[in-house]
Amino acid sequence: MSNESPLCLGLEPSIDENCTHIILGSMPGVVSLREQQYYAHPQNRFWRLMAHLLEGTPPPDEYAARLSMLLRHRIALWDSIDSCEREGSLDSAIRNVRANDFSDLLERYPRLHTFCLNGGKSAAIFRRANRELMARRDLTFHALPSTSAANARWNFTKLAEAWKKALPLEK
């Protein structure tokens, strides 16, 4: 058996020119990479949480409709990590990280101003790779509790309370 972990390559961002917020995971899990869909594991609470906070409804069934829901609310979706080695889906197994380039993304999408970091690993990788961006006064950063089912300390109600402070919710 090899000591090398499989190479994981992240997904393309879901974004358009109207986005003001971006939610960043760490690296999609095995199910998400196989399906080529963010938060595809049925136990992850991400889509349920977003639909609840943004529209007060259950999440759409179709993946394209889920992405459209975020874009309607000016929310982009991507990851802190471009590629890494990882056995399984747990963030604790991530090694040999190559971070995504957010300077380039901000040049292409100048309306982005708020970064929502989904979980501790996403926040740690982002902070380590983007020290200059973190110092910018025109950008806001929110380290948020992970929506993963593995984050059992945070029930749905507590997640919603934490996340609603960072999202562009209609008042």
Image (cartoon, helix red, strand yellow):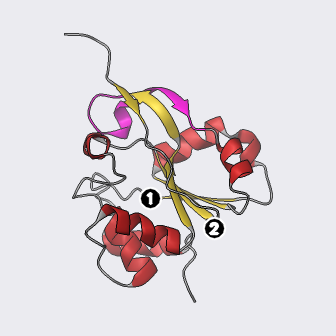
- Horizontally, residue 71 falls left or right of residue 38, namely right
The residue to which callout 2 is attached is 18
Secondary structure state at the residue bearing disc 1: loop
Res. 47 visible in picture: yes
Give the x, y percent position of residue 113: 69, 62
- Horizontally, residue 63 falls left or right of residue 17, namely left
Residue, far bottom: 171
The reply to whether discs 1 and 2 touch (Cβ–Cβ < 8 Å) is no
Looking at the image, tell me whether mark 1 or mark 2 is earlier in sequence order.
Answer: 2
How far apart marks 1 and 2 lie (CA) works out to: 26 Å
Instruction: Please state the extent of the stretch shown in magenta in the rendering.
Output: 86-100
Label at residue 101: none
Badge count:
2
Per the image, is 88 magenta? yes
Residue drawn at x 58%, y 75% is 168
Give the x, y percent position of residue 158: 39, 72
Which of discs 1 and 2 lies nearer the camera? The answer is 2
35 or 57: which is nearer to us? 35
Res. 154 visible in picture: no
**What's the residue type where badge 2 is placed?**
Asn
- Horizontally, residue 158 falls left or right of residue 1, namely right
Quadrant assignment for the N terminus: top left
Q: Is residue 6 above or below residue 100?
A: above
Residue, far right: 137
The residue to which callout 1 is attached is 145
**What's the residue type where badge 1 is placed?**
Pro
Give the x, y percent position of residue 157: 35, 75
Residue drawn at x 47%, y 68% is 70
Quadrant assignment for the C terminus: bottom right
Residue drawn at x 47%, y 43% is 121
**Residue 76 lies in quadrant:** bottom right
